[in-house]
Amino acid sequence: MSVLDRIRIGLLGLGLLFVVTGLLPVREAGDQLARIAPILLFLGAVIVLAELTKEAQVFDVIATRMATVGRGNYLALFLLCTAFASLVTMFLNLDTTAVLLTPVMLALAARTGIAALPLAMTTVWLANTASLLLPISNLTNLLAMERLGMSVQEFAGRLWFPQLVSITVTMVFLWVFFWRRGRRGADRYDPPVPEPVADPMLFRTAAVVCLLFIAAILLELPIEVAALAAAVLMIAAFAWRDRSKLTFALFPWQLLVFVTGLFLVVPTLSRYGLADVLGTLAGTGGGGDGAYRASAIGTGLANLINNLPAYTAVEKVIPMGDQDQLLALLIGTNVGSVITPWASLAILLWFEWCRRSGVRVPIPTFVLAGAGLAMVGVGATVGALLLTA
């Protein structure tokens, strides 16, 4: 069992201990679990969907085609990679980008002689900064949409421009710090030779199921139902074509344990002083000042303790009717969680993949570049949010 798994199980155990000892009343614990039950169903289903989509080689084919279309031109490849990582994050969740797209990108780098770090940083930064647009993009979005009582279209309509701004700022930082000629160390790359997929039927089925899942989300079907239906279709396809891929490892128990533990521990800490401290920092005034305060608190706390507990803790002290302040908090915890290696679960998972692949990530560069991106990205994105209020 890995260190991360021990931390997840320990967090759940601590949360259960709080309930058993009465530090967190059973009724409040039940309310928290009832709130996240649909979210846990969605998370479990969408990770299974994404994992089987990867096994069907959909991601591999797209990544290879991108490098082929780029024809050895790094600027073209950069634009294609940022678009790919952004779309995967928006429509299949940021953890999918970290867990499944990262190894695909690193394998592509090895096949083409492209420096691995620019591709790796593209996935990890956009996993966070491109996760604003849709409720499915990030667990924090689901919580915010529920709190605000917004539909999927209302949520996307409010955040499309801030999302565009955050991606644009991220692209600038990616190019300056990792993709420009002086950083990547080469003028051109060798386009890869396309390889045939192992099972064309599974590949086509996975592609169609993903498109149907996206259509269901845009039609505002319940996201947990859409994800579950898509996952069931993929499981059925693999049961027919390749049962060896249907293992218990598909089920993301680690993520579900982690989220459940957080939703027991954070409310307990809020009852015993955390909410008062955060309420003082957030202040009582709304408007632009309140939005920037909320985003700053979200950014700082996310990089200190992780973005999910940061969001759930600060959410409690924001007035119910203050949409701008809550969405600014969301920007802080999503876009701003790029400084420390533990700021989001996606980053933790990404670091593990880089370690396995032998990709060296200079921590000082990661932290300093991430701090610059967080400051500029959060500030610009909150500004875009207020412009469209």
Image: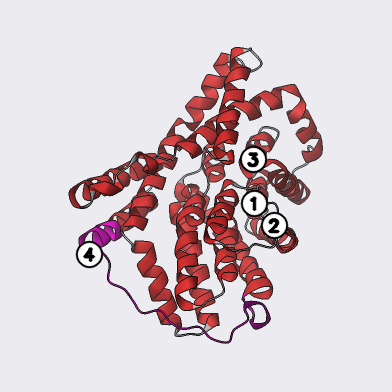
Residue type highlighted by circle 2: Val
Look at the image and name its color scheme.
Answer: secondary structure
How many angstroms separate mark 2 from mark 4 (CA)? Answer: 42 Å
CA separation in Å, label 4 and label 3: 42 Å
Residue 117 disc label: none
Q: Which mark is residue 311?
A: 3
Question: Of the numbered discs in the image, which one, if any, rests on residue 331?
Answer: 1
Q: Is residue 185 magenta?
A: yes
Q: Residue at x 64, y 37 (%)?
A: 309
Contact, mark 2 vs mark 1 (Cβ under 8 Å)? yes
Q: Amino acid at mark 1?
A: Ile
- Residue 275 occupies which quadrant of the picture? top right
Label whose residue precedes the other's in the sequence (2 or 3): 3
Q: State the residue at coordinates (60%, 64%).
A: 121
Q: Is 270 or 201 nearer to us in this picture?
A: 201
Q: Which amino acid type is marked by label 3?
A: Tyr
Do residues under tags 2 and 3 come within 8 Å of each other at their CB atoms?
Answer: no
Looking at the image, can residue 130 be seen? no
Q: Which comes before the other along the chain, label 2 or label 4?
A: 4
Residue under label 4, please give it.
200
Q: Residues within 10 Å of mark 4 (few under 14, many from 20)?
A: few
In space, the residues marked 2 and 3 are separated at their CA atoms by: 15 Å
Which residue range is magenta in the image? 179-208
Assign a secondary structure to mark 1. Answer: helix
As helix, strand or loop, the secondary structure at mark 3 comes to helix
Judged by depth in the image, the label closer to the viewer, 1 or 4, is 4
- Marks 4 and 3 close (CB-CB < 8 Å): no
Residue beneath disc 2: 378
> Judging from the image, what secondary structure is the residue with disc 4 in?
helix
* Label 1 or label 4, whichever comes before in sequence order: 4
Residue sitting nearer the eye, 333 or 342: 342
